[in-house]
Amino acid sequence: MQKNTPPVFGDDFMRSGIRDGLGAQWKVVSGTFAVAGEAQAERAASPFHAVAKPGDGEAAARAGRWYWNDYLVAASFEYSGGVIGLDAYVHSSGFLRFSAGNGRVVLSLVDAATGKLRELAAKDVQLVPGWHQLALAVKKGRATAFLDLSAMLEAEALPPCGTAGVYASGNSVRIDDVVVLPLDGAVPLDALKAWWGAPPVVRPLFERDPAMQGWSRSSSIFRYDRRTNTVASIMPLPAPYSVSFTLPRVDGQLDVSAGEVFHIRRAGGSISLNEGESAEAKGECVLEVGDKSLKFSVAGRELLARQRSDAAAGGPVPVVFSGQLASSLLSSLSISGTDVRQFTFYRAPALFQPLSGNWAESSLWACSPQYSWLQGRSGFTEASRVAALRYRELLNGDFHIRAVVAVPMAGDQTPYYEFPTNFGVMLSHPSGEAAPVTCIYGLCDMVSVIADGPKIAASGSYRTSPFVRRKFSLVKEYVHTTWFDVELTRKGGLVTMKRDGRSLASARLAGLPPVLEASFLVADNGVAISRLEVAAEKLSAQAYRSPTLSESARRLYIDLVYRDFPDRAETQRLLAERAAVNMLAPAARTLPVSAAADKAFREAAGRRYFKWTWDEAHLPAGFSGFDGVELFPREDGSLLVVNRHQGGGMLLPLAREPFDLRDYP
């Protein structure tokens, strides 16, 4: 490597198989380090990290080149006591150290020969347990220390140059997302915001440079969306490719009607495309909709298709572009002129109340405190196998709800994940009446359902192509987490569900009141929510209150049980001990079940179990494409449908009367 190579390094520790040390790019100076994974890595949002064990002294590890200068080093630490810190400009004469813990943050100069510290600056700061982001920037002889994006200390930096590293003493500590960035004349705080992400300054799309050999995944096939924590692709995208998004109503000026025209402006004039037309455009173009504009780049012939299948009903119009698209096209045009509330689960508000399971804020791969996630896990007992979260919001008029949720998967699994993850949005009347609609995203089964009272109003399904399946199956060493962007939109009486900008299902529901209450429910054995955005003409928070037994008895509970059912006896024992309440649906009575399923249940009455192959036309809500399931009748009159291939099941309440939670142990 040449001496003028800029200071560029990073490690997210997303690798396995290293028992001791951190890998060839690191030099362990003292203590012990190892790459560790979660106990159930396949269910964790960030499954791998480094562990520093100081022992009786301290633990320190270094990386980089001796001639590096004018750079910034940052890392995430899970603080639980002791002292954590960063080293910079590690030189033969000494080095700088930024440490935090024991009620203080200190910027020191450490003598390389004796190990003695000379304090340059200090401040009393009480560090609460949990994940924190530390950064130390040195530029033109001036050092600045940051804690969670806030400048803490400044001092003159005496060493001329040197490597960077991490440090811990007192307690063992988990470390993640170490990065070294060249400042190149940038202000250190601006460099931190650009890297970690601080609204409105966000690096929306980051593609890892293949020349950055320090990265554990040094390949351009990985793309990371720092705004949503999304792994956008795990393989090179074919060229050309298509990206679709939906243009919503903008300030009432954009009304979806016959003859509506979108404008694409480019150098040399503007072009307008009517339905079915196409035009050739080169270079940078601007899409104009009302007073909103969006830039994108094109290469060769650019096609624009106007799909008007639902235009007559006043629904949104999907616009599909084909060609090489700039990352700015991935940005969405949100409803403007409305009250927008965003939650990124960094010190999440208290109104988010867990219903079951264990919920905690988790560190972001990209070291961003603003864009961390809320992670839920179930316990190991039958009574705590479900993790569910609830939050309520009052919505007035038209609105949209967007959430980024994660589905964990092991690298040797296909995208037909074996972890049933469901994100539900329940719309109800603020008076507490029975909810008119529930939208459930079955992220495991690739199914979406809109339930209007006691009946299914609309449903949709989505699949991953076999080509992507094969690509995923080639990766066996790592554990990945895939994030989904799900959205619910209400325009008048039309309710639409989307996943990653693609419409899944829509239904026009009669009798929707102008004001609705939205409850967000997530159910899974391991799930993470990265971001929740709610936009409406007017919204206000409603204090959370736990449902009473009488209130719960008026609603329908759908049970999703995650279990590798080893045998029928184990299944019966599980059902007898505990009915896992996973997803709340607002119907006063049971969802309708097909005549074939009802007949199968009656035929199975009195048996321990009954095996039957579903007819494709009689699939129950929440299932699609299963070639065979097993039915288990229960004493309470319900029917458990088990998919033995995926290890999941759904409890179908066939009783004609409402459920009562008092029936469950």
Image: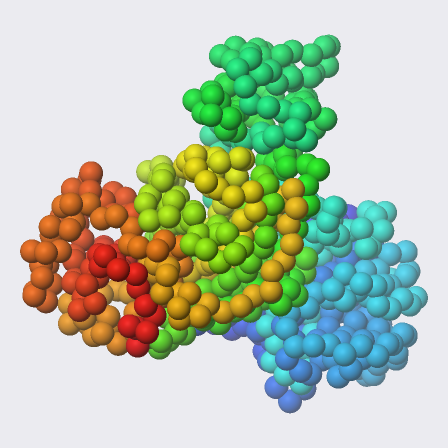
Please give left or right for residue 259 compared with residue 193 in the image. left
> Image quarter for residue 364?
bottom right
Q: Looking at the figure, which quarter contains the C terminus?
A: bottom left
Task: Judge from the rendering whether residue 149 lies leftward or rightward of residue 285; answer left or right.
Answer: right
Q: Specify whether 39 is left or right of 593.
A: right
* Figure check: 579 above or below 138: below
Residue 486 lies, in percent from the top left, at 49, 45
Place residue 543 in its image quadrant: bottom right
Relative to 273, residue 432 above or below: below
User: What residue appears at the point 74 percent right and 64 percent down from the top-left corner?
Assistant: 148
Side of 649 relative to 267 (left or right): left
Looking at the image, which is closer to me, 28 or 288?
A: 288
Q: Residue at x 86, y 76 (%)?
A: 123
In the image, what residue occupies the spot 60% across and 80% down? 172
Which is more toward the observer, 477 or 556? 556
Give the total number of marks visible in the rendering: 0
State whether residue 86 appears in this view: yes
Measured as percent of width and height from the top left, residue 431 is found at: 52, 56
Q: Position of residue 573 (x, y in %)?
A: 20, 74
The front one of 372 and 470 is: 372
Instruction: Relative to 273, say whether 651 is above or below.
Output: below
Give me the residue at 10% from left, 67% from top: 608
